[in-house]
């Protein structure tokens, strides 16, 4: 087994880059939509054979065991080459939770299946009445013999129509003083009569997310991860690394590159007003990257990140949105046209970038919620 | 663990902060403004003793030999207390020129030692009021013409003047008390004075000549631009702190105004802006220390100034709004920060100007 962390950063980066450049299918680079598993299965097999599906997991569980520093490099290279993250909710979310809180039996059973994508996971947290106020969730799970019986509804469940399993937060005790209590973390199979998945069409016409209805659906009690009624704190504990990842510069950097080639092709730079706004956006991206590396350096020094890392997400997602808005402006009368717009010999899908940018300020804790967090946890403002 | 470089900068920041706070912080700056907008000669000597002016001057010429990143640390501290002493002018411009053109000249040691302060006069005002082609002449040891936007003109002991000599550009030194030198003083928003100089056969000593003069000027202006950005970063930092304290303590509707979400979110936006500016400007200064190509250095300096100005404008202006009417008074310190931000923004190019310069430089590099 290779000890990646023993390599120099430069060597490691080279190794990762070479693998992506040589092996990643060209037609899957910078995919504008979320793929179904079948579309990327071939790539996943290669990654799996290489042992690179789970860069962050400890090696003993089949991961690469990367340090924070190496992990950042891995993701930077992935994003640089436009490598799709695949159906990674298993790897990114359930896996780490099972590793941290699961029993040996759960680890032995679930982890290899996540790596091989034998199980494909979706995340069932949000409900119609529980969005930003997630702790308001009402989907019930009640013990019945060896099983839990689940009733309720999840919504906005990304790619639930292409998943075999759902990890969910459910209410296991409805009578607690605080609504954050009485919530548990549960794994459930999707392929059963009590689970009904309906796709929701997004603004861009894609079917990316779903409603999932539970009508006396069942899952064995042994699929409870961690302690009963302790799901809330467990789910929170997972967020720390995600928080820098979601604020990484790559989305905005890629969009800026797209904007630049599109605007150049369309002659938009002849307009001094456009030039200024482009310069503003480009500088926003550069200076964000400087702030990002400050946090990344902190991780590399082995420090844990504080709540202030939220500012990366606020800045970069809003910047990403402005960049895609500029693309639409540069498109002029084509700004409402679906599909790639031709500039020179490349097609730039302006609307799809625009749509992709919209929800980034909504999910992962909306930007308003991030501002609430910063104002209290970092600025110490009252109330 | 911080690297040793970072550790050096941290210590430098700490000692500069202590020095300014002991001297009286922003209260001292207010007093000096009220007394007519000059600086404090004793403070110049104290800063010199701490090595401030020689921060980027090589050790063999009596400086600390630390580089622009260290200069930026000091400039940030100057900005935090809006100190009127011409630190950026000295480190960036006057020593920026002298250390490149004539590092062994006696003036270098005198400036580093705080015995003398020189201002730099290079821009000229055209008939429409804006900057114009230079036309100031130097022949037979005498200067003729005019210079505008000279920062520190009121207290400087002399002027480093860029002029056209008999065979190309020259850098000359004119004494502030020289004959046939008149100084028109223009008071700035922060109470400081900017000078318009006119020379009619004013005696001056030549320090350097040839194309090197123009090159050194370009680099000195790059340095000063980036350092002014750092000063704005420090200023923004402190202006935000003052505002944050205020919204935590001012009560309306029986609560601190900082408990209202709209105020909280605006405060967060200012905080994020200050952090982005700080990270961006510090990165630029560190990169400029390792960059030798003047064009790339100019692009970097523009990036820093564009960011620092836009952040400082937004932070100081929103700060006034968040203070309510007291923010509009002269009595509250926050106004001093707004006024200094106005002056530092206009000096050496504002954000819109530097975005233009940055964009053009980027295009040129892309084409090359
Ligand atoms: C593309 C996409 C994919 C998603 N995928 C998943 C998934 O796979 N699994 C899953 O569980 N969820 C998923 N979500 C749901 C996501 O987590 C929620 O959308 C998010 O938590 C916000 O909840 P909401 O949509 O109900 O908005 P609401 O909470 O109703 O918010 C509406 C507006 O009010 C603002 N607001 C709410 N509370 C406050 C407050 N206290 N202060 C100030 N403003 C406030 C919000 O910022 C927002 O602007 C996805 C969402 C999107 C858009």
Image (cartoon, helix red, strand yellow):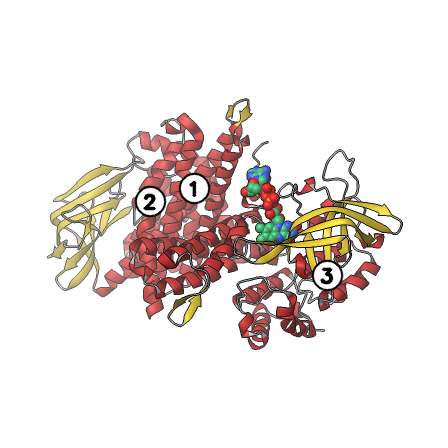
Mark 2, residue position:
B345
Q: Is residue A309 left or right of residue A348?
A: right
Mark 1, residue position:
B236
Residue farthest along the bottom direction in this orientation = A22
Q: Is residue A99 left or right of residue B72?
A: right
Q: Quadrant of the C terminus of chain A?
A: top right
Q: Nearer the viewer, residue A103 or B138?
A: A103
Instruction: For marks 3 and 1, give the one nearer the viewer.
Output: 3
* Letter of the chain that mark 1 sits on in the rendering: B
Which image quadrant is residue B322 in?
Answer: top left
Kind of element beneath mark 3? loop
Q: Nearer the viewer, residue B16 or A139?
A: A139
Horizontal and vertical percent for residue A96? Answer: 71, 57
* Letter of the chain that mark 3 sits on in the rendering: A
B68, above or below A1, in the image: above
Q: Quadrant of the N terminus of chain A?
A: bottom right
Mark 3, residue position:
A164
A36, above or below B157, in the image: below
Mark pair 3, 2: CA separation: 58 Å
Q: Are marks 2 and 1 on the same chain?
A: yes
């Amino acid at each position: 087994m290779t000890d990646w962390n023993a390599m120099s950063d430069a060597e490691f980066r080279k190794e990762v880059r070479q693998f992506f450049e040589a092996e990643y299918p060209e037609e899957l680079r910078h995919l504008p939509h979320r793929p179904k598993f079948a579309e990327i299965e071939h790539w996943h097999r290669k990654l799996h054979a290489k042992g690179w599906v789970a860069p962050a997991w400890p090696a003993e569980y089949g991961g690469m065991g990367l340090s924070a520093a190496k992990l950042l490099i891995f993701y930077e290279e992935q994003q640089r080459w436009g490598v799709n993250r695949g159906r990674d909710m298993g790897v990114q979310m359930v896996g780490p939770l099972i590793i941290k809180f699961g029993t040996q039996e759960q680890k032995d059973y679930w982890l290899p299946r996540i790596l091989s994508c034998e199980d494909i996971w979706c995340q069932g947290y949000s409900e119609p009445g529980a969005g930003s106020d997630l702790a308001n969730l009402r989907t019930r799970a009640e013990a019945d013999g060896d099983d839990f019986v689940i009733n309720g509804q999840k919504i906005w469940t990304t790619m639930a129509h292409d998943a075999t399993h759902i990890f969910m937060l459910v209410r296991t005790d409805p009578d607690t003083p605080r609504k954050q209590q009485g919530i548990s973390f549960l794994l459930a199979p999707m392929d059963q009569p009590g689970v009904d998945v309906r796709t929701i069409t997004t603004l861009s016409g894609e079917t990316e997310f779903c409603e999932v209805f539970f009508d006396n659906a069942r899952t064995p009690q042994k699929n409870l991860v961690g302690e009963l009624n302790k799901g809330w704190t467990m789910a929170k504990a997972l967020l720390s690394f995600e928080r820098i990842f979601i604020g990484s510069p790559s989305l905005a950097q890629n969009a800026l590159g797209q904007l630049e080639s599109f605007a150049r092709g369309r002659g938009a730079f002849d307009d001094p007003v456009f030039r200024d706004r482009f310069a503003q956006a480009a500088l926003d991206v550069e200076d964000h990257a400087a702030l990002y590396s400050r946090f990344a350096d902190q991780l590399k020094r082995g420090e844990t990140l504080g709540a202030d890392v939220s500012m990366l997400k606020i800045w970069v997602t809003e910047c990403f949105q402005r960049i895609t808005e500029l693309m639409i402006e540069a498109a002029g009368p084509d700004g409402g046209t679906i599909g790639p717009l031709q500039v020179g010999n490349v097609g730039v899908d302006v609307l799809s970038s625009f749509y992709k940018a919209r929800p980034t300020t909504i999910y992962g804790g909306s930007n308003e919620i991030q501002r609430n967090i910063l104002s209290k946890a970092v600025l110490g403002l009252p109330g | 663990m911080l690297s040793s470089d970072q550790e050096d900068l941290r210590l430098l920041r700490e000692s500069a902060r202590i020095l300014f706070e002991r001297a009286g912080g922003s209260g001292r700056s207010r007093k000096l403004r009220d007394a007519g907008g000059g600086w404090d000669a004793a403070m110049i000597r104290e800063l010199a003793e701490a090595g401030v002016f020689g921060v980027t001057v090589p050790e063999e010429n009596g400086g600390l030999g630390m580089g622009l990143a260290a200069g930026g640390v000091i400039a940030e501290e100057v900005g935090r207390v809006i100190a009127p002493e011409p630190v950026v002018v000295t480190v960036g411009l006057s020593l920026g020129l002298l250390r490149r053109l004539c590092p062994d000249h006696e003036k270098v040691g005198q400036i580093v030692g705080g015995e003398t302060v020189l201002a730099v006069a290079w821009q000229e005002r055209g008939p429409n009021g804006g900057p114009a082609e230079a036309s100031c002449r130097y022949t037979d040891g005498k200067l003729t013409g005019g210079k505008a936007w000279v920062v520190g003109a009121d207290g400087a002991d002399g002027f480093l003047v860029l002029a056209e000599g008999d065979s190309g550009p020259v850098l000359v030194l004119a004494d502030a008390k020289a004959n046939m030198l008149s100084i028109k003083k223009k008071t700035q928003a922060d109470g400081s004075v900017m000078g318009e100089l006119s020379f009619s056969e004013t005696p001056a000593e030549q320090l350097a000549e040839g194309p090197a003069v123009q090159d050194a000027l370009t680099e000195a202006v790059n340095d000063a631009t980036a350092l002014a950005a750092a000063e704005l970063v420090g200023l923004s930092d402190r202006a935000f702190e003052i505002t944050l304290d205020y919204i935590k303590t001012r009560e309306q509707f029986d609560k601190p105004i900082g408990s209202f979400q709209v105020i909280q979110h605006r405060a967060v936006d200012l905080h994020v802006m200050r952090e982005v500016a700080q990270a961006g400007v510090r990165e630029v200064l560190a990169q400029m220390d390792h960059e030798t190509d003047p064009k790339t250095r100019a692009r970097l300096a523009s990036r820093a100034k564009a960011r620092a100005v836009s952040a400082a404008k937004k932070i100081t202006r929103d700060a006034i709004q968040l203070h309510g009417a007291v923010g509009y008074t002269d009595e509250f310190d926050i106004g001093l920060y707004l006024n200094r931000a106005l002056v530092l923004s206009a000096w050496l190019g504002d954000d819109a100007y530097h975005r233009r310069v940055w964009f053009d430089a980027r295009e040129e590099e892309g084409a090359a």
